[in-house]
């Protein structure tokens, strides 16, 4: 396994964990909209972390959604 990919994936997962921690703080302080936003970004960075192993990346949310979209029959 390429060590650069592993480092990149770990970095992105750390960003996801930071966003999730922020989301929890916001939620506990009744800042629900901000909590949802940080939760979304936690998921976004988690997916980017996993996609590093397939050597795909997009900084745009739409690019990742398109990549993961299952073709309709």
Image: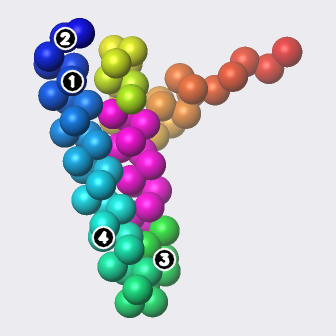
Which structural element holds mark 3?
helix
Q: Is residue 12 left or right of residue 50?
A: left
Element assignment for label 2: loop
Q: Position of residue 1 (x, y in %)?
A: 23, 9
Q: SS for tag 1?
A: helix
Residue at left offset 33%, top offset 79%: 25
Q: Is residue 20 above or below residue 61?
A: below
The label shown at residue 2 is: 2
Residue carrying label 1: 6
Work out whether mark 1 precedes mark 4 in sequence or the reverse, and give the earlier one: 1
Quarter where residue 23 is shown: bottom left
Q: Measure how far apart labels 2 and 1 are at the Cα level.
A: 7 Å
> Is residue 25 depicted above or below 56 in this figure?
below
Spatial distance from mark 1 to mark 4, Cα to Cα?
A: 24 Å
Whether the residues at callouts 2 and 1 have beta carbons within 8 Å, the answer is yes
Disc number lying in front (1 or 4)? 1
Give whichever of discs 3 and 4 has the lower sequence position.
Answer: 4
How far, Cα to Cα, is label 3 from label 1? 32 Å
Distance between the Cα atoms at labels 3 and 2? 38 Å
- Badge 3, how many Cα within 10 Å: few under 14, some, many 20+? few
Circle 4: element type: helix
Question: Image height check: is 63 above or below 34?
Answer: above
Of the two numbered discs 3 and 4 in the rendering, the one whose residue sits closer to the viewer: 4
């Amino acid at each position: 396994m390429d060590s650069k990919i592993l480092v990149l994936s770990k970095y992105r997962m750390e960003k996801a964990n930071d966003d999730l921690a922020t989301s929890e703080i916001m939620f506990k302080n009744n800042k629900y909209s901000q909590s949802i936003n940080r939760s979304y970004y936690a998921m976004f960075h988690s997916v980017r972390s996993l996609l590093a192993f397939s050597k795909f990346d997009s900084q745009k949310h739409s690019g990742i959604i398109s990549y993961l979209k299952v073709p309709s029959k």
